[in-house]
Structure formats: C-alpha cells, structure tokens
C-alpha cells in the first residue's frame, strides 16, 4: 500500500517576522510580524506616523531588515535580495513619470530596465494597461492624463514584470473620490486574479470586509486578520478610532 504524497502548503506571498527599525532615537517599527497569504488583498492600515512608509521601505529593499526577517514567496530578502525583489511590483507614494512622453513610452522605459525584449515588451504593456482599464490611453502623453489615470498607469508599470506581490504606498493620495474608488476596485480585481496585494492607507473606506488587514499603530501590529471578523458589528471608522485615537 502506498501512502499519499504529503501536501506542502505554498509559502505565503509575504512573511515578516521580528522586524524593527529606528530612525535615530525614534522607533518606527517595533517587532512587526505578519503573513500575507497568496492571492489576498491586505490593507496595511495605520494613522499618520504609524510606520507604514518605513515598513514599505524595508519591503522594497531600501532599508535592510535588521533585526527582522522578510520573505517573499519563501525567498529571504536579507539573503537573496535580488530574487526576492524580482517577485515584487511597487507603487511608491511619490509618482515618477515623464509627463512629456506617452503612457506606452513610459512603460517601455521601465520594461527595458527589466531586460525585456521588444516583442515581449509590447505584449506586456498591452496586458498591464488592459488590466487597469487603460489600454486606449497607451498613446496619450502622461502630462495630459488626470491624476487617477496617471496612478493607474503607475500600477500598470508595476505589473510589467508579472510580479506575484504588489506593494502600494498610499496610492490614492491626492485623488478625488471617483478616482479613488476606481483604483481601489481595479486593485481588488487584480487580487482576485491571484496577485497578492499590500495596500498601505489611512483611509478605511478603501477596505472591504472580505479583505485582510494589518493595523499598524506606533510601529507595532495592533491587529491582524479579516476586516469583517475584526470589526464585527462596529463601523470601521469607529473601530479604527477606538484603537488608534485617530479619525479615519
Ligand atoms: N527618514 C526619517 N528620518 C527620521 N524619522 C523618520 C523618517 N521617516 C519616518 N520617520 C519617523 O518614523 C515614524 C514612522 O513614520 P512613517 O513615515 O513610516 O509612518 P507612516 O505610517 O507612513 O506615516 P504617514 O502616513 O504620515 O506617511 C514617524 O514618527 C516619523 O516621523
């Protein structure tokens, strides 16, 4: 009789353990730990100064985890940073685009940095823009786009190398309500196709009950789990206010 082959659980898209960081005398992260399962939308929620951007800086390799361990799909960022970073797409808080060039030209530049060939590049650009509902804007100059479309272009750019994990640092800052809603919906759709998403925000209306959430407060994880299960019957703004003292 043969015994069934053991099933091996896939590595989480992202795992953070024992992570701390100080900016001089200021403790920005203090023993942060959480895991993000594959194919989930997870909000990194926290008031101003909670440590979200510092954590994003660690996760994008700008700050070395010390102490602490970050693994991306099982790859240790400290030991194999290039391999870990290859699996991540990033949308930083500050946009970086050439406004005088078209959307496609901006994306081509990024694809070249990733070492993609010409035919592959065009296919990837079309694929990424289509996922963000931006395919018809490929030939438009970035400077002519509204803020929401620019942001969508940046998200498309972060997808060009087909990462399994997408990190976004407050991607809706400065956008009006319709543009925020559109981007939030598009990124939820990406998660539904299997891309894991970590979405840093202090705006609770961007979260759905079915999302995961890591609540960061004063550099520590104050709560983690599914949004609906955590808040129960309490409106999310009230739940957030009770735990952080900050209005959402
Ligand atoms: N480069 C830096 N030098 C010194 N202190 C810093 C630096 N960056 C952040 N801090 C401090 O670290 C703490 C966490 O800041 P961080 O920007 O990571 O929080 P945040 O949650 O992203 O806030 P925000 O939403 O305002 O961007 C804050 O007290 C901040 O003042």
Image: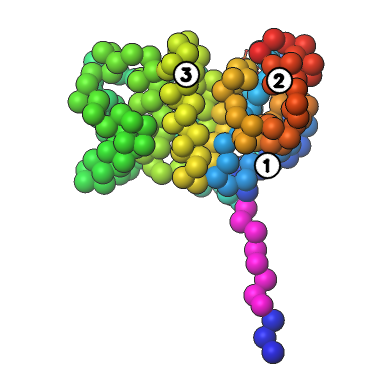
Q: Earlier in the sequence, mark 1 or mark 3?
A: 1
Q: Earlier in the sequence, mark 1 or mark 2?
A: 1
User: Which SS class for mark 3?
Assistant: helix
Q: CA distance from mark 2 to mark 3?
A: 20 Å
Asked where in the image residue 114 lies, by quadrant, the reply is top left
- Residue 27 visible in image: no
Q: Most extreme residue toward the bottom, as rendered?
A: 1
Picture quarter with ligand 1: top right
Q: Nearer the viewer, residue 64 or 127?
A: 127
Query: Is the shortest distance between ligand 1 and the CB of mark 3 under 8 Å?
Result: no
- Specify the principal SS of the magenta part: loop
**Dot label at residue 235:** 2
**Residue in view at x 54 percent, y 41 percent:** 196
Q: CA distance from mark 1 to mark 2?
A: 25 Å
Left or right relative to 57: residue 190: left
Q: Earlier in the sequence, mark 2 or mark 3?
A: 3
Q: Is residue 105 above or below residue 12?
A: above
User: Which SS class for mark 1?
Assistant: strand
Q: Which residue is mark 1?
A: 35
Instruction: Nearest to the eye among marks 1 and 3: give it.
Output: 3
Left or right relative to 178: residue 113: left
Q: Are marks 1 and 2 in contact (CB under 8 Å)?
A: no
Q: Which residues are magenta?
A: 4-11
Q: Which residue is mark 3?
A: 180
Residue 218 in percent (x, y) is at 76, 19
Q: Nearer the viewer, residue 59 or 221?
A: 221
**Residue in view at x 67 percent, y 86 percent:** 2
Was residue 132 drawn as part of the magenta stretch in this picture? no
**Residue in view at x 57 percent, y 33 percent:** 198
Q: Is residue 25 above or below residue 1?
A: above
């Amino acid at each position: 009789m043969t015994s069934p082959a053991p099933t091996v659980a896939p590595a989480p898209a992202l795992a953070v353990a024992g992570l701390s960081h100080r900016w001089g005398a200021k403790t920005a992260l203090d023993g942060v730990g959480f895991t993000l399962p594959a194919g989930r939308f997870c909000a990194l929620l926290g008031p101003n100064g909670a440590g979200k951007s510092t954590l994003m800086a660690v996760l994008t390799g700008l700050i070395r985890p010390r102490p602490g361990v970050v693994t991306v799909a099982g790859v240790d960022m400290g030991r194999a940073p290039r391999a870990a970073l290859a699996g991540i797409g990033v949308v930083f808080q500050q946009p970086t685009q050439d406004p005088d060039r078209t959307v496609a030209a901006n994306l081509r530049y990024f694809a070249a940095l990733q070492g993609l060939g010409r035919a592959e590049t065009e296919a990837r650009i079309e694929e990424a823009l289509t996922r963000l509902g931006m395919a018809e804007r490929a030939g438009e100059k970035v400077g002519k786009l509204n803020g929401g479309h620019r942001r969508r272009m940046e998200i498309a750019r972060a997808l060009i190398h087909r990462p399994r994990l997408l990190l976004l640092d407050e991607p809706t800052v400065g956008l009006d309500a319709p543009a925020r809603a559109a981007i939030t919906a598009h990124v939820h759709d990406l998660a539904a196709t299997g891309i894991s998403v970590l979405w840093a925000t202090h705006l609770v209306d961007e979260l759905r009950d079915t999302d995961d959430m890591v609540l960061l407060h004063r550099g520590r994880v104050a709560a983690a789990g599914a949004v609906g299960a955590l808040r129960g019957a309490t409106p999310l703004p009230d739940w957030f206010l009770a735990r952080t003292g900050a209005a959402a």
